[in-house]
Amino acid sequence: MTNANQYKILVVDDERISLKNICHVLEKEGHKTVQANSGSEAIKELGNLPFDLVITDLKMDDIDGFQVMETTKQLQPETEVIIVTGYATVNSAVEAMAKGAFYYIPKPINLKQLKEIIHSALEKSLFRKEFKKLKSTGNIQSGATQFIGQNKNILQLKDTIAQVAQLDCNVLVTGETGTGKELVARIIHELSPRANKRFLAINCAALTEELMLNELFGHEKDAFTGASKARKGLLESAEGGVVLLDEVGETPLQMQVKLLRALQEKSIFRVGGTQEIPIDIRIIAATNRDLKEEVLHKTFRQDLYYRLNVFSLHIPALRDRRDDIPALIRYFLTKYPSLDHQTKNMSNEAVAVLMDYDFPGNVRELENIIERTLATCNESEIKPGHLPEEVITHVEPLLQSAPTLDVPLESLKNTEQQHILFVLRQANGNQSKAAEILGISRVSLWRKLKKYQDEGIDINQYVSTWK
């Protein structure tokens, strides 16, 4: 981080005493301040000068702090905003966070807390500006090819991964289970200046608080019963490298305090130790939780969230990038050996079935499906019948209000069958139109009609385009 006197901070408050007090603290820390006595004056300053940080009061007579923040984000997107108010409420705090505030501080201000928050905000603002500079100059490593996909969101993600890798800052990777968060973390490591150092993945959900404390920080000899010799913790042993805190949202609150201190001070104490040990590591945190929601519910520390979230990367669910499924299928077909150790193909019909599936387990589930199918399929081409039953029998939601039928509703199976044939008749045998009315895909409708035909039902009277 650059020297403190290079940071320019805009302070906005219509109370002159509060304004002077905040500026006094900032200038004592070595920062350069610009004062604004109103929201309109602040907006004028934002149009004239670049700032590294804006600290604004919320309630002001002419233009409030939210409007100042909105203008800041429009004119200087990389600049962080801290909102200060003497009228703190839960609703206003939630609104401030939702609109992009870095932090929300109630009055009277805790000066120690203010200094820590300002340090974190300036750090994030600096990395945003470096990131923008790298992006504009193209001075980055290309790569991230291990992340398979050509979906527009994935292509953008790959580009961002390659750029963020060059910045030695903490990164928060979010996404559902199975989307590839650890893969993204490994790619960042491989493309970063720390590539020749260790990459260490730690599953925070798999450790109790006591185990996590010992695993992360290590212990000194005789620190507890059975500690016959000193032992380095994982953070210490990853010196110079990258540490992935997987499922960081599962970290117990007391452990979050210790982790925050280690990140802020860049040093640790072993369990039972009194000597401070410096550490030089880059942290990548991953979670399938919404940490902003966890912060609001006080199950995750806000200061730790901001310390981890210098940059965030979100991996979309597989159902939101279905156009990448064929490429992923091809990759996994070559990755795993089949029963006869021959590379197999997959029929268009089987691919269509997988394209129609929602994949609650995302890419990891697709990989497991392909591996299981290859282990049991003894034909040269994988067909729909070779896929696991939970995929084949996957039922899309039907219309919630079905027409009244002139047939006995003896079972759910009969009800569904008669309703589908009724809708098909109303659509004059047009399968695409019938599928749209039913709220299911054409592939799902095709599977059902094929099953009815195999059961001996004459569907020619309903389907004019049946093949």
Image: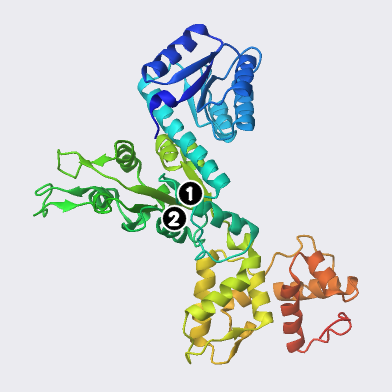
Marks 1 & 2, CB-CB < 8 Å contact = yes
Nearest the viewer among 131 and 309 is: 131
**At which x and y percent is residue 24?**
41, 13
239 lies above or below 86: below
The type of residue carrying mark 1 is Val
Q: Position of residue 189 (x, y in %)?
A: 40, 56
The residue that appears at 65% across and 17% down in the rendered structure is: 63
The residue identified by callout 2 is: 188
Indicate the quadrant containing the N terminus: top left, top right, bottom left or bottom right.
Answer: top left
State the scheme by which the image is colored: rainbow
Label 2 element class: helix
| Residue denoted by label 1 | 164
Query: In the picture shown, does residue 50 fall above or below 420?
Result: above
Q: Is 35 situated left or right of 30 in this image?
A: right
Along the viewing direction, whichever of 23 and 129 lies nearer the viewer: 129
Residue drawn at (51%, 37%) of the image: 129
Pinpoint residue 42: horizontal percent, then vertical percent.
60, 18
- Amino acid type for the residue under numbered disc 2: Ile
Q: CA distance from mark 1 to mark 2?
A: 7 Å
* Residue located at (44% from left, 49% from top): 166
- Residue 223 visible (yes or no): yes
Of 387 and 120, nearer the camera is 120
SS at badge 1: helix
Q: Nearer the viewer, residue 97 or 123?
A: 123
| Left or right side of 370 for 355 | right
